[in-house]
């Protein structure tokens, strides 16, 4: 399998359009210790020719142009992008689908609940049903992803429930309850030789998730915040990480602690919020996550 990080930042990207915070200012002036990142997405391929996107980020057009593997190679209209697998209905997972209009066939894979969110938003009708096949994946069942001509891709995807919440734009008046179901899922991708987990949003490490990830070869995990209250402390927001459906890296219930005994061979942070100091290569927090065996994902990072 080949696997490439197209974008490693959380929703908003790094720098975020309306952020004048110190980290974003460093990214904006081209500081090599604070490189800009687009919103989270990964591309995977069994044969190096046909690619599946894990999430369609709002930055997808830029990500395609930045990665030659995703450029058209045949005829006047074509694309190596054979499909998209979604982990949820958040803006940063689905907005890039709008870039994939123009009538080139691909498969769109998600849970029934996430498909219902797309179906309820008529703007996604730009993905014409005679061209874009919408495939519902049941939870906890590995399914081979198909190429647009119906042949198998050699990649098998399994979606599994992780603690999360409904997308921000579907929240009601009250703070949403944490849910573990079809709203937020992790994605497991494997071919005959290698495997990868993509979990850009996860509100807590459950026993079931720990059991699943124990001993895995490669896990790309939610790196949204370093501290649960970092946006409040910085004065850039009023929400904690948990309120947004994300566990944080530090702390007793944090990601570093949760993974410390899981014996995952390679651990990479993705979906990193612009407030997270691990984005800054000279920060003590970066040194701490690296000492705990984590790599901080970046755009263009070739994983496999
Ligand atoms: C999240 O990851 O919490 C969401 O992407 C936030 C958002 O939709 O802005
Ligand atoms: Mn997000």
Image (cartoon, helix red, strand yellow):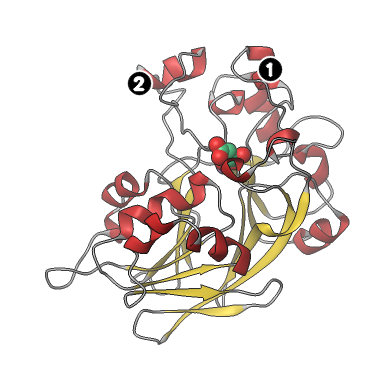
Of labels 2 and 1, earlier in sequence is 2
Residue at 50% x, 50% y is 93
The number of numbered discs placed on residues in the rendered structure image is 2
Callout 1: few (<14), some (14-19), or many (20+) C-alpha neighbours within 10 Å?
A: few
Instruction: Decide which of 237, 152 is in the foreground and name it.
Output: 237
- Quarter of the image for residue 124 reads bottom left
Can residue 271 be spotted in the picture? no
Distance of label 2 from label 1 (alpha carbons): 26 Å
Give the residue at mark 2. Answer: 30
Is the residue marked 2 within 8 Å of ligand 2, measured from its CB?
Answer: no
- Residue 183: x percent and y percent? 66, 56
- Residue 68: x percent and y percent? 27, 55
Give the residue at mark 1. Answer: 232
- Residue 107: x percent and y percent? 42, 72
- Residue 274: x percent and y percent? 53, 27
Residue at 69% x, 55% y is 265
């Amino acid at each position: 399998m080949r696997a490439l990080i197209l974008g490693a930042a959380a929703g908003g990207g790094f720098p975020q359009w309306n952020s004048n915070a110190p980290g974003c200012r460093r990214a904006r002036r081209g500081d090599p210790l604070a490189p800009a990142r687009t919103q989270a997405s990964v591309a995977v391929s069994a044969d190096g020719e046909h690619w599946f996107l894990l999430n369609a980020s709002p930055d997808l057009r830029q990500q395609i142009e930045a990665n030659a593997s995703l450029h058209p190679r045949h005829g006047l209209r074509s694309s190596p992008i054979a499909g998209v697998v979604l982990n949820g209905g958040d803006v940063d997972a689905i907005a890039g689908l709008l870039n994939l209009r123009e009538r080139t066939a691909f498969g769109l894979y998600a849970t029934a609940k996430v498909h219902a969110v797309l179906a309820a938003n008529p703007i996604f009708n730009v993905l014409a049903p005679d061209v874009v096949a919408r495939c519902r994946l049941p939870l906890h069942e590995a399914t081979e992803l198909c190429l647009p001509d119906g042949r198998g891709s050699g990649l098998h995807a399994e979606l599994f429930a992780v603690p999360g919440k409904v997308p921000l734009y579907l929240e009601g008046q009250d703070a949403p309850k944490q849910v573990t179901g079809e709203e937020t899922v992790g994605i497991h991708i494997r071919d005959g030789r290698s495997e990868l987990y993509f979990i850009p949003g996860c509100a807590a490490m459950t026993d079931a998730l720990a059991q699943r990830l124990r001993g895995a070869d490669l896990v790309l995990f939610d790196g949204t915040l370093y501290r649960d209250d970092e946006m409040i402390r910085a004065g850039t927001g009023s929400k904690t990480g948990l309120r947004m459906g994300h566990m944080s890296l530090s702390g007793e219930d944090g990601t570093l602690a949760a993974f410390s005994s899981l014996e995952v061979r390679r651990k990479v942070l993705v979906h990193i919020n612009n407030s997270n100091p691990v984005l800054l290569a000279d920060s003590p927090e970066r040194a701490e996550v690296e000492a705990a065996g984590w790599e901080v994902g970046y755009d263009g990072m070739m994983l496999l």
